[in-house]
Image (tube, rainbow, N blue to C red):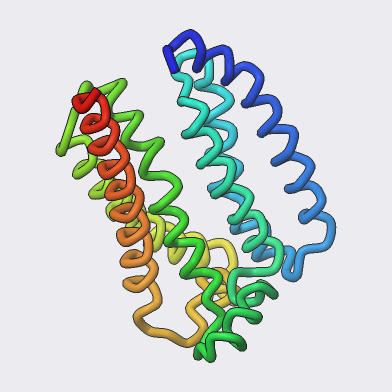
Amino acid sequence: MDRSGARGGNRLLLPGLLLFYGLFWTWLAIAPVDRRDWLLENLLSLTLVAVLVLTYRRFQFSVTSYCLIGLFMTLHTIGAHYTYAEVPFGFWLKDHLILSRNPFDRIAHFAYGALLVYPLRELLVRLAGVRGFWASYLSVSAILAQSGLFEVAEAMVASIVSPELGSTYLGTQGDEWDAQKDMAAALTGALFTMSVSFALSWFSIRNRSAI
């Protein structure tokens, strides 16, 4: 898709995504499992939405990137409503896969890497002019760095705003290595998406050369 086509799609897509997210967010904001935890969980997510809206005229992501961001935000909204440790789907997975904990928070961290590394790579390519291997490497590295930064930020927010909510907000579920495993999940997700993107690009180039 050319740039003008992407911009035309974005003009229609962004309002639609905002409307869907706004309605979905409002619905799940009515009666969250833990109101204080819900407020903490939404600090960063609402900041991201505000940044995307305010910078839209200066920088427009591709349709693919906006869809990936929207999908992650939807997933995060579900986790914020129930608290990540108590999402029903996670309990269903726990029972059926015979797991020791609710895995929804780990799924969300994997999704963070898998869904947001592509928009981040697009940002590096279009603003910094990074190409090829370095675009993918720096994107994956940034996801890992951001994941670590968020773990630190979450701990600071929990300790300052509501210390008694620490374990609920952080969703450790008694695992002392929870932060490291969350970072590893984000890294795995980012590597997965970049591997798929590389494979699709390689097959596309190979098919064009064969014609």
In this rendering, the answer to whether 162 lies above or below 25 is: below
Q: Which quadrant would the C terminus be assigned to in this image?
A: top left
**Along the viewing direction, whichever of 152 and 3 lies nearer the viewer:** 3
Residue at the extreme front: 211
The quarter holding residue 12 reads top right
* Furthest residue in direction left, as rendered: 133
Q: Percent x, y for residue 58?
A: 46, 14
Left or right relative to 116: residue 191: left
Residue 130 visible somewhere in the drawing: no
Determine the residue located farthest toward the top in the rendered image.
4
Q: Residue at x 52, y 69 (%)?
A: 105
Name the one closer to the observer, 192 or 168: 192
Please provide percent x and percent y for residue 180. 32, 72
Give the answer, above or below, for where 165 lies relative to 144.
below
Q: Nearer the viewer, residue 44 or 27?
A: 27
Q: Is residue 123 visible?
A: yes
**Viewer-nearest residue: 142 or 12:** 12
Instruction: Residue at 55%, 71% (x, y): give it.
Output: 104
Q: Report the residue at 61% width, 42% height from top.
A: 46
Give the image location of residue 88, x and y in percent: 69, 75
Residue at 55% x, 37% y: name it. Answer: 67
On-image quarter of the N terminus: top left
Side of 147 where 211 appears, left or right: left
Q: Whole-percent x and y of residue 129?
A: 21, 21
Instruction: Say above or below: 120 vs 160.
Output: above
